[in-house]
Amino acid sequence: MPKGLPASVPDDGLSTRQRRNRPLVMVHTGDGKGKSTAAFGLALRGWNQGWNIGVFQFVKSAKWRIGEQEVLERLGRLHRQTGEGGPVEWHKMGSGWSWSRKQGDVDDHAAAAREGWNEVARRLMAQTHDLVILDEFTYPMKWGWVDVDEVVTALADRPGYQHVVITGRDADPKLIAVADLVTEMTKVKHPMDAGQKGQKGIEW
């Protein structure tokens, strides 16, 4: 795609502007590192455009406060104080979800995942966010906690202008089919292969 030009122009009756501004479903999958990192980098771009950002983490423990969460939540506070950028919400399944009264570790992870997806689906219909990041959401679908067909239908039928990013390994073929952009992260080398543990600023 040299100089940002598409490889082909479809005969779909849309203007260049209309086609360019269509909302996207993006999937970051594969065994390599960087799936979530790329999604959160996109959130920073979106915040700078004034987008309403919603992040939903489906697997990571509530005890982990990764660097991107700290930064984006600070940017959300900056927006509330000054109007700069856009609003930011960050929700974690491991904390019982931010809208739920139940806090702490959740024993029934499948039920928690379904609760999270149901809330995301409601927000998609309400057009709450401009960018929705469903971090490690491929796993609840793979494990049968969330119905893939239901997710695919909700994504395909979502109203308005809403970008959605889904991260995680082993993305379902149906999810890949409905997506507009799919990137597979492939590991070539990793420090952990040589016995090196994760470190600050790289893993979190």
Image: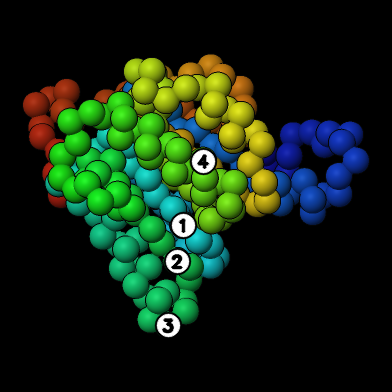
- Considering only vertical position in the picture, is 106 above or below 193? below
Q: Answer left or right for 162 relative to 98.
A: right
The reply to whether the C-beta atoms of the residues labelled 4 and 2 are less than 8 Å apart is no
Q: Position of residue 71 (x, y in %)?
A: 30, 62
User: Which residue is at a point 44% across and 44% down the rendered structure image?
Assistant: 119
Tag 4: residue type? Ala
Classify mark 4: helix, strand or loop: helix
Which residue shows up at 10% across the image and 32% down it? 196
Cβ–Cβ under 8 Å for marks 2 and 1: yes
Q: Earlier in the sequence, mark 4 or mark 2?
A: 2
Label located before the other in sequence (2 or 1): 1
User: What residue sits right under mark 4 in the picture?
Assistant: 121
Identified at 68% across, 51% down, the residue is 160
**Place of residue 82 in the rendered image (x, y in percent of width and height, measured from the top left):** 42, 82
Q: Please, what is the three-letter code of the amino acid marked with disc 3? A: Thr
Q: CA distance from mark 4 to mark 2?
A: 19 Å
Return the residue found at the far bottom: 82
Circle 1: element type: strand
CB-based contact (under 8 Å), mark 4 and mark 1: no
Q: Which residue is mark 2?
A: 87
Q: Secondary structure at mark 3?
A: helix
Q: Which residue is mark 3?
A: 82
Query: Circle 1 sits on which residue?
Result: 53
Compared to residue 23, the image places residue 188 above or below, namely above
Of 1 and 120, the residue lying toward us:
120
Pair 3/4: label in front = 4
Residue 16 makes an appearance in the image: yes
In this orientation, does residue 136 appear? no
